Image (spheres, rainbow, N blue to C red):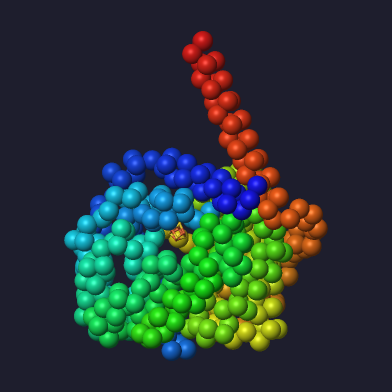
């Protein structure tokens, strides 16, 4: 099976999963309200500041609609399932949120607008609406930086030119970079852009003083724990010469209607261990990588079925150590943690993997299909049994 066939089988499976998302949830939300807001830690000019994230109700990611989306991403479940949200609704999502803060909205030096997709994709949100939102945020005095998320392919010079003309705030664009290894990005994540695309878009953004922040999800499916760590380190090395303000490390979760969920149900995926995260943090220090790495909280716009972690005894300590690391870039709190679960992690981490990646992906996809078929048959049998009662 060539890569293109594997890619098609992954995409078809993902598209099927997206089509199963029930549209019933659309009755439960109003298009002029954000999903929720969250206060998080942010960095500005080397200082720790408060940042406010607005999880906008989005139209739905075009990549999810056209290609099934990324293997781990369940954000589509929280969107308007591809039905385009009107400009006035998007703008009201922002103005209504500002109102709920009773005059304190601009106490956040950084405001992030996330739409569970790409803010620079006209099919998800008109650029006119983005411009109007930037205009509104520009009128909020205390805000110093506006952060949006976009697919790297959607960034274009014309739009950047217009965005910097409407605001004097700093602009940052978070992009899903995932891995510098094209095969892993393509087949384990289902993002098929080339590193050259990233380089080109980064150059354009630089011309306009817009920061690009790559997001890399730890441990994509199909990789062993150790492969995931090594790939992460390679990706950090690749990104180092770009002198980025920071790189965002996302901790994986298992979300419904995703390929990762199907693999997890089949016992073929476990979210990363915190011990693996520590391996990455230690390696980047040993290699003298200086681009700041920020570890995002595993809290997204959709709830998770499973998430990154070790065991009940040490998870809280790791979460505290992550917070400390994000604030001061120090490993000291991690180094204080000891727990018996490390032995189990090490067994998994150093286990030999005999199959190459392509063979493994093919095998796992076949097993998912088999499990799906088995479930369908058993459901059918149960229904037949009920009918004959
Ligand atoms: S991670 Fe981003 S690009 Fe990928 S499916 Fe989710 S919203 Fe779309
Ligand atoms: Zn533990």
Residue drawn at x 58%, y 68% is 179
Residue 213 position, x and y percent, is 47, 76
Residue 346 position, x and y percent, is 77, 63
Between residue 368 and residue 9, name the one nearer to us: 9
Q: Quadrant of residue 225?
A: bottom right
Q: In this view, does 243 lie above or below 303?
A: below
Q: Quadrant of residue 130?
A: bottom left
Residue furthest toward the top?
388
Residue 242 position, x and y percent, is 53, 83
Q: Is residue 68 above or below residue 177?
A: above
Residue drawn at x 43%, y 72% is 174
Task: Left or right? Give the position of 132 relative to 354.
Answer: left
Ligand 1: quadrant of the figure? bottom left
Figure label count: 0
Residue drawn at x 54%, y 15% is 385
Between residue 273 and residue 360, name the one nearer to us: 360
Residue 278 position, x and y percent, is 67, 72
Q: Is residue 192 above or below residue 278?
A: above
Residue drawn at x 57%, y 73% is 322
Task: Left or right? Give the position of 283 relative to 246.
Answer: right
The reply to whether residue 221 is in sight is yes
Task: Left or right? Give the position of 359 relative to 235.
Answer: right
Between residue 181 and residue 146, name the one nearer to us: 181
Task: Left or right? Give the position of 368 relative to 79.
Answer: right
Q: Is residue 2 above or below residue 52?
A: above
Residue furthest toward the left?
88
The reply to whether residue 316 is in sight is no
């Amino acid at each position: 099976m060539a890569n293109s066939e594997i890619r098609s089988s992954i995409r078809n499976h993902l598209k099927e999963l997206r089509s199963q998302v029930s549209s019933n949830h659309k009755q439960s939300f109003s298009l002029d309200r954000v999903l929720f807001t969250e206060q998080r830690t942010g960095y500005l000019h080397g200082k720790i500041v408060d940042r406010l994230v607005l999880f906008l109700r989005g139209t739905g990611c075009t990549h999810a609609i056209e290609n099934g989306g990324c293997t781990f991403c369940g954000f589509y479940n929280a969107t308007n399932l591809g039905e385009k949200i009107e400009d006035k609704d998007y703008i009201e999502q922002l103005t209504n949120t500002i109102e709920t803060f009773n005059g304190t909205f601009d106490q956040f030096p950084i405001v992030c607008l996330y739409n569970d997709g790409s803010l620079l994709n006209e099919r998800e949100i008109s650029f006119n609406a983005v411009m109007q939102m930037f205009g509104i945020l520009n009128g909020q005095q205390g805000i110093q930086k506006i952060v949006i998320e976009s697919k790297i392919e959607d960034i274009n010079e014309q739009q950047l030119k217009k965005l910097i003309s409407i605001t004097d705030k700093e602009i940052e664009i978070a992009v899903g970079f995932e891995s510098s290894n094209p095969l892993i990005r393509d087949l384990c994540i289902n993002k098929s852009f080339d590193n050259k695309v990233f380089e080109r878009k980064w150059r354009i953004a630089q011309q306009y003083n817009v920061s690009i922040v790559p997001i890399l999800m730890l441990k994509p499916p199909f990789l062993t724990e150790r492969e995931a760590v090594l790939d992460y380190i390679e990706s950090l090395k690749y990104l180092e010469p770009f002198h980025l303000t920071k790189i965002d490390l996302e901790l994986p979760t298992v979300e419904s209607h995703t390929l990762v969920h199907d693999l997890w149900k089949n016992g073929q995926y476990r979210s990363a261990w915190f011990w693996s995260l520590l391996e990455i943090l230690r390696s980047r220090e040993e290699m003298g990588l200086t681009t700041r790495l920020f570890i995002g909280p595993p809290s997204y716009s959709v709830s998770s079925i499973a998430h990154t972690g070790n065991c009940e005894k040490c998870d809280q300590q790791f979460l505290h150590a992550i917070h400390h690391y994000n604030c001061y870039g120090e490993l000291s709190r991690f180094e204080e943690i000891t727990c018996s679960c490390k032995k189990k992690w090490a067994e998994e981490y150093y286990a030999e993997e005999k199959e190459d990646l392509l063979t493994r992906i093919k095998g796992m996809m076949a097993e998912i299909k088999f499990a799906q078929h088995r479930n369908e048959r058993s459901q059918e049998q149960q229904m037949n049994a009920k009918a004959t009662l």
